Amino acid sequence: MAISTSIWIWIAALLTLSIYSFLYKDNPFYKFSEKILVGISIGYTVSIYFHNTIIAKVWNPLVHDHNFLVIVPLILGLLMFSRLFKGKAYLSRIPIAFVVGTGCGMSIPSSFENLFKQVQGTMPQVFTIGNIIILIGVLSTLIYFFFSVEHKGIIGKVTRVGITFIMIGFGAAFGATIMARISLFIGRIQFLLGDWLGIIS
């Protein structure tokens, strides 16, 4: 058993323990580590966006490649900051309209493509038990969200089947979320017991 002598591992371990101290109650150690996490995340995100957007897509094409067309999106981006100035906020509607319009135009073909893929995946090529269950689940769930017909009689029974499939889907999603959190927790415990304290290898 050999405790780590690396200052960075000690800092990471102490910050990890500070975060988990919230399990006892809210305390200054948790608040301190939380603010460090938020600050580092924001700083890292800003630096990534600066290098991947400002430098790679504005500065380099404008200065090195002499591509002056990038001035147009640069102006549109700067107009977004007009919301910070009273009386000039209306100028931000121009880039917002451009982004929304192009976004909708580009998403429509991909949305239809995804829809066709889902329909193709739902329709069973071979009538196995699994494929039939998927087909019943999709149709009953869609009928549940069809509110033009009152959910009574046969429709009501079908919608109850749809609710069951919806609950199964929510349960599976929630279970996957819990498993992901447990996986992160196990990784932190392995770090504390292995890299920091050297109890496990």
Image (tube, rainbow, N blue to C red):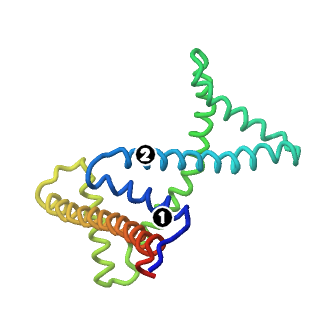
Q: 166 or 114: nearer the eye?
A: 166
Q: Residues within 10 Å of mark 1 (few under 14, many from 20)?
A: few
Q: 98 or 131: nearer the eye?
A: 98
Marking on residue 160: none
Residue 63 image offset from top left, x and y in percent: 86, 43
Q: How many marks?
A: 2
Residue 87 image offset from top left, x and y in percent: 58, 15
Q: Secondary structure at mark 1?
A: helix
Q: Residue furthest top?
A: 87
Q: Secondary structure at mark 2?
A: helix
Q: Is residue 120 above or below residue 80?
A: below
Residue 57 image offset from top left, x and y in percent: 74, 47
Q: Residues within 10 Å of mark 2 (few under 14, many from 20)?
A: few
How far apart in space, not on screen, are marks 2 and 1 (Cα)?
50 Å
- Give left or right: position of 32 versus 85: left
Name the residue located 88 percent from the left edge and 44 percent from the top edge: 66
Q: Quadrant of the N terminus?
A: bottom left
Q: Residue furthest left?
A: 153
- Give left or right: position of 123 versus 174: right
Q: Mark 2 and mark 1 in contact? Answer it, CB < 8 Å.
A: no
Name the residue located 43 percent from the left edge and 58 percent from the top edge: 14
Name the residue located 81 percent from the left edge and 47 percent from the top edge: 60
- Give left or right: position of 166 versus 55: left
Q: 4 or 118: nearer the eye?
A: 4
Q: What amino acid type is highlighted by mark number 2? A: Phe
Q: Which residue is mark 1?
A: 116
**Dot placed on the residue nearer the N-terminal end, 2 or 1:** 2
Q: Mark 2 or 1, which is nearer the eye?
A: 2
Residue 86 image offset from top left, x and y in percent: 57, 16
Q: Which residue is mark 2?
A: 32
Q: What amino acid type is highlighted by mark number 1? A: Phe
